[in-house]
Amino acid sequence: MTFLKQKSSSLLDKEIEEKVNLRLKYKKERNFKEADKIRGQLQELGIIIEDTKEGKTTWRIS
């Protein structure tokens, strides 16, 4: 969690959004191994990824 405290929130948000968007790209390509890898990386940083039934993905810091 030290990583999260050292970054400005806007920079951190941008980096998280980039990872989330890359994960969505992998999911659309049915490359679930890489999508799960990104989810795991974010989870290690305390970022929770939530996928809705409507296909939308949100994230939050736990």
Image (tube, rainbow, N blue to C red):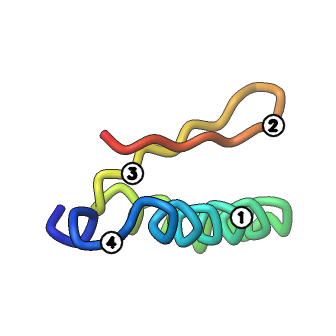
Measured in 3D between alpha carbons, the distance from the residue under mark 4 to the one under mark 2, in whole angstroms, is 29 Å
Q: Which quarter of the picture shows residue 15?
A: bottom right
The residue lying at 38 percent from left, 67 percent from top is 8
**Sequence order check, earlier mark of 4 and 1:** 4
Residue extending furthest top? 53
**Sequence order check, earlier mark of 4 and 2:** 4
The residue lying at 33 percent from left, 72 percent from top is 7
Q: Which quarter of the picture shows residue 54?
A: top right
Locate residue 11 relative to residue 27 in the image: left or right: left
Q: Quadrant of the N terminus?
A: bottom left
| Element class at badge 2 | loop
Which three-letter amino acid code belongs to the residue tagged 2?
Gly
Q: Position of residue 24 (x, y in %)?
A: 74, 60
Disc 4 or disc 3, which is closer to the eye? Answer: 4
Measured in 3D between alpha carbons, the distance from the residue under mark 2 to the one under mark 3, in whole angstroms, is 19 Å
| Residue 21 marker | 1
The residue lying at 74 percent from left, 69 percent from top is 26
Contact check, label 4 and label 1, Cβ < 8 Å: no
Residue underneath mark 3: 47
**Sequence order check, earlier mark of 1 and 3:** 1
Which three-letter amino acid code belongs to the residue tagged 3?
Ile
Which three-letter amino acid code belongs to the residue tagged 4?
Lys
Determine crowd level at label 2: few under 14, some 14-19, many 20+ residues with C-alpha closer than 10 A: few
Residue underneath mark 4: 7
| Element class at badge 3 | strand
Contact check, label 2 and label 3, Cβ < 8 Å: no
Contact check, label 2 and label 1, Cβ < 8 Å: no
**Sequence order check, earlier mark of 2 and 1:** 1
Residue underneath mark 2: 55
Contact check, label 4 and label 2, Cβ < 8 Å: no
